Image (cartoon, rainbow, N blue to C red):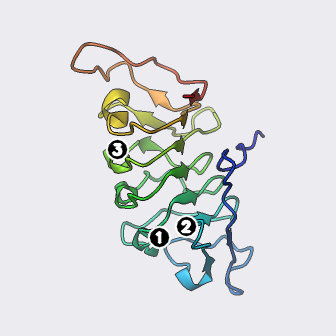
Amino acid sequence: MASSPPFPSTPSACRCSYSSPPSTAGSGASVASASPAAWTVTVAERCLDLNTESIFGGLNQSSTLFRLKFLGQLNLANNNFNFTKIPSSLGILTNLRYLNLSNSGFSGQIPIGLSLLIRLVTLDLSTLYFPRVPTLQIENPNLITLLGNLSVVKELHLDRVNISANGEASDGRVAPQLWSKPIIVE
């Protein structure tokens, strides 16, 4: 099983952590129910790293996570969100520069709300492929529309995201069917 690259892949790496409350340690705490008091957020880094924390279930639109509007870096990689959709509420975290949702068990259409994250430098939505398992997709809106506002993105990871050929831009350009390599802009 392949693992995600270190997050983020810049010199100012995320140096924060998540400390599970004693009652949920190792039991697969849900982000919707975990208390923000249990989260250790490095204010200078404005970072919340919940990579491989056995989080399961969905993200409720009213989750405390969406109140952390100061966050610059959010890593929810390698958890199990049980094939729920990526919440459009992520779009209110407008200070995010790094967002890693790789291998997190999200599925369905990637929400247009992500296009509100205009400060994003790194976006990782990649996933592993398993037959008959729902995947993330970009169909309506299409790739060009979804990424239109993200003018400072330098790294975009969409490995195994289903990019539909039905998603045409207004000028007739069509996104490729299968995305397999990250885009790195230098």
| Quarter the N terminus occupies | top right
Pointer 2 or 1: first along the chain: 2
Instruction: Determine which of the numbered discs, if any, sits on residue 65 in the image.
Output: 1
For marks 2 and 1, give the one nearer the viewer: 2
User: Are there few (<14), some (14-19), or many (20+) residues within 10 Å of tag 3?
Assistant: many
Task: Name the residue rendered at 42%, 49% in the picture.
Answer: 119
Residue at mark 2: 46
Q: Is residue 35 at least partly visible in the picture?
A: no
Q: Which residue is mark 3?
A: 115
Q: In 3D space, how far apart are the residues under numbered discs 2 and 1 (Cα atoms)?
A: 13 Å
Q: Secondary structure at mark 3?
A: helix
**What is the three-letter code of the residue carrying label 1?**
Leu
Among the two numbered marks 3 and 2 on one chain, the one whose residue lies closer to the N terminus: 2
Q: Residue at x 32, y 14 (%)?
A: 173
Task: Find residue 27 and report its horizontal and vertical position in percent.
Answer: 70, 74
The answer to which of 120 and 39 lies nearer the viewer is: 120
